[in-house]
Image (cartoon, helix red, strand yellow):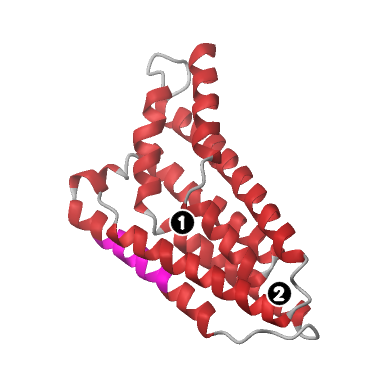
Amino acid sequence: MPSTELLIAFFATTAIFAYIPGPAMLYAAAQTMARGRWSGLTAALGIHLGGYVHVFAAAAGLSVLFHAVPTLYLAVKLVGALYLIWLGISLFRKRADGDAALPAIERKSARRAFFESITVEVLNPKTAIFFMAFLPQFIDASAAFPVWLQFVVLGTIVNLMFSSADIVCVFLAGAVIGRLRRSSRAQRLMQRAGGAVLVGLGVHVALQKS
């Protein structure tokens, strides 16, 4: 494994990146605002699991394709952006749910948030590029462990740390909306706010330069 000094730098840098507000944190917060804390937590779990696709892709070197084939990168980015926009619009069109039906709707929404978040993360080429650009800075080719295993171990640590930031964001968003949950008007406003965040993220991803 890398030296102690390299690992300290790795953990410090990862923590800084993890707790700077980014798309994953905003996505988890948007799901929390629109569907409740449980949906936000399952969305964070989905993002976490989707992140492993990029971890193993980085370990296998597959993410290099995004650098070698810019058209492929653009296509995946646009598909992911359109998916985010579609999710946001669907929240705008959804009717506010009554308190009596809330428990069943929360369970259904949590499952939906889980699978949607996996799709969003897998379709995020920026995550793939991040792992390919960030992790090699802390890989020691002369270490006893093979390079691919170092990628997996360090990538897993990064994914866990980023997910911890997503969970913190979910609880902060949940604390805000918890007091507003009894008001159907407030629920509708928070649902629309969540939809607006998702649409904004989709537009940002679509317009962001490679």
Up-down relation of residue 21 to residue 97 (above or below) = above
Q: Amino acid at mark 2?
A: Glu
User: Mark 2 touching mark 1, by CB under 8 A?
Assistant: no
The reply, left or right, for residue 183 in relation to residue 127 is: right
Q: Residues within 10 Å of mark 2 (few under 14, many from 20)?
A: some
Q: Position of residue 103 (x, y in %)?
A: 78, 77
Residue at 66% over, 66% down: 39
The numbered mark at residue 70 is none
Dominant secondary structure of the magenta stretch? Answer: helix
The reply, left or right, for residue 129 in relation to residue 15 is: left
Q: Position of residue 56 (x, y in %)?
A: 44, 43
Secondary structure of residue under mark 1:
helix
Structural distance between the alpha carbons of marks 2 and 1 = 22 Å
Q: Position of residue 27 (x, y in %)?
A: 53, 59
Up-down relation of residue 182 to residue 126 (above or below) = below
Magenta span includes 81: yes
What is the number of callouts on the image? 2
Q: Amino acid at mark 1?
A: Glu
Quadrant assignment, res 95: bottom right
Viewer-proximal residue among 119 and 208: 208
Viewer-proximal residue among 67 and 60: 67
The numbered mark at residue 106 is 2
- Residue that badge 1 annotates: 121
Residue at 42% over, 61% down: 201
Q: Position of residue 2 (x, y in %)?
A: 48, 17
Up-down relation of residue 178 to residue 23 (above or below) = below
Viewer-proximal residue among 124 and 54: 124
Residue at 51% over, 53% down: 24
Residue at 54% over, 25% down: 12
Q: State the extent of the magenta-drawn residues as a range.
A: 75-85
The reply, left or right, for residue 197 in relation to residue 181 is: left
Report whether residue 1 is seen.
no
